[in-house]
Image (cartoon, helix red, strand yellow):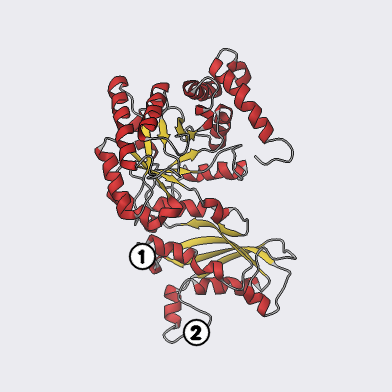
Amino acid sequence: MNEMIQATYLVETPLEIERVAAIMAGEQSCGTFARVAGETEELRQRAGAKVLGITRLDPFDTPSLESQYLISKGIGGPYTRARVKIAFPQANIGSNLTTLAATVGGNLFDIGQLTGLRLERLDLPASFRSRFPEPVQGISGTRQTLRVDDRPLFGTIIKPNLGLSPEDTAALVAQLCRAGVDFIKDDEVCGNPDHAPLKERVRAVMTEIRKFRQESGRDVLMAFNISDEADAMKRHAQFVAEEGGNCIMASLNWCGLSGIETLRKSTDLILHGHRNGFGAMSRHESLGFGYQAYQVLYRLAGLDHLHVHGLGGKFCNPDEEVADSGRHCLAPLVPGGPDRDRVMPVFSSGQWAGTVAATHEALNSPDFLFLAGGGILAHPDGPCAGIMSMRQAWEAKVAGIDLDTYAKDHPELSGALAFFGKKAELSNAPGKKS
């Protein structure tokens, strides 16, 4: 049975929308701008994509993007916007993730008849989902490693981002372990720098983490940034495992789908996916990818964790978009899919104790990784107080007590409210974006 993969697009064009939708379906399946030899009706029925539906939206007088094709033909507005749903035969794609991406994206973004195109959503049949690996560790494996079942996981990022030696990094990790952190990660710009080569950094850091495990009986997840070309990432992951590590991080957009697939097949370590650069694909409302479609592609590559940014954070995303992204991570990739086919959403960017409760409320679940760089390391009373402030914010949430009241008997939370709360007020002042 040739089941279909459904893609939903936000489309903008000055031309008849039905005609443009048909062009999109043909271009990304068996057709081109003109009939060619061998393009029989039987072939078109078997391999052609199908337009399932068109929902018209309000037109615009000016285009979101220019098209030389339209300019050369003297075609102008008004510009129709519509949501277009197209179904692609999964037999066209096989078990090939890069071909899936080329099919639902690819040349569609260059079609001259369009002045805007955004892939908003991908819906997969269960038969196609089964061709790709589920998370190796996922949420349950992450929790099992840490032996934490009933609360969010609290973590931080190595700061300064760059400049620390392997020994400096290891000393900071040792301090954070003793302070009670669950998770630590390299920054995305710290891969294999001259001042802290990856192997030396891994060796120094894991010496401290192994010592902490032996002394405390607890574990800490350390996500080493092994982003590199595919063969190098496989070697890096093996070295992390040999040193007793449990987690690796990769910059998804720069390693690419095939690089992440290759890495996943080579290791059972927890794979922490960082989405840095996603704004280049998503920030314009009429261009690129929506998060739902994006996360489908990279989850098919086998991730365990996936970044979504943070509520009230320092980046451009509105809170509802961030919350919606987190909810996508917590849902199986196909309706009714198994609970194990979920990934841990990672909230970061400008996070601190004051955003813990809102994050839980947005998800209606404690299954999230909450990362605070400055929110821990810049706490006025030190990193231990920073971590304690977030634990206390969670305790207040569970108890149903507002933060100001709970902070009266919890100095770490009180210090966070006084220090970070004032900065949050300034960042949300009129004329500034949160």
The alpha-carbon separation of the residues under discs 2 and 1 comes to 25 Å
Residue at (46% x, 30% y) in the render: 152
- The kind of residue tagged 1 is Gly
- In the image, residue 426 lies at what x, y percent? 68, 32
> Which residue is identified by label 1?
94
Q: In front: 53, or 319?
A: 319
- Above or below, 42 against 100 in this view is below
Within the image, what quadrant is residue 126 found in?
A: bottom left
At which x and y percent is residue 250? 40, 47
**In terms of sequence position, does the residue under pointer 2 or pointer 1 come before the other?**
2
Q: Nearer the viewer, residue 86 or 403?
A: 403
> Which image quarter: residue 91?
bottom left
Q: Quadrant of residue 304?
A: top left
Q: Can residue 158 be seen in this view?
A: yes
Q: In this view, does 315 lie above or below 366?
A: below
* Spot occupied by residue 288 in the image (x, y as percentages of width and height): 56, 59
Q: To which residue does mark 2 refer?
A: 35
Location of the C terminus by quadrant is top right
Viewer-closest of 432 and 260: 432
Is 430 left or right of 284, judged from the image as shown?
right
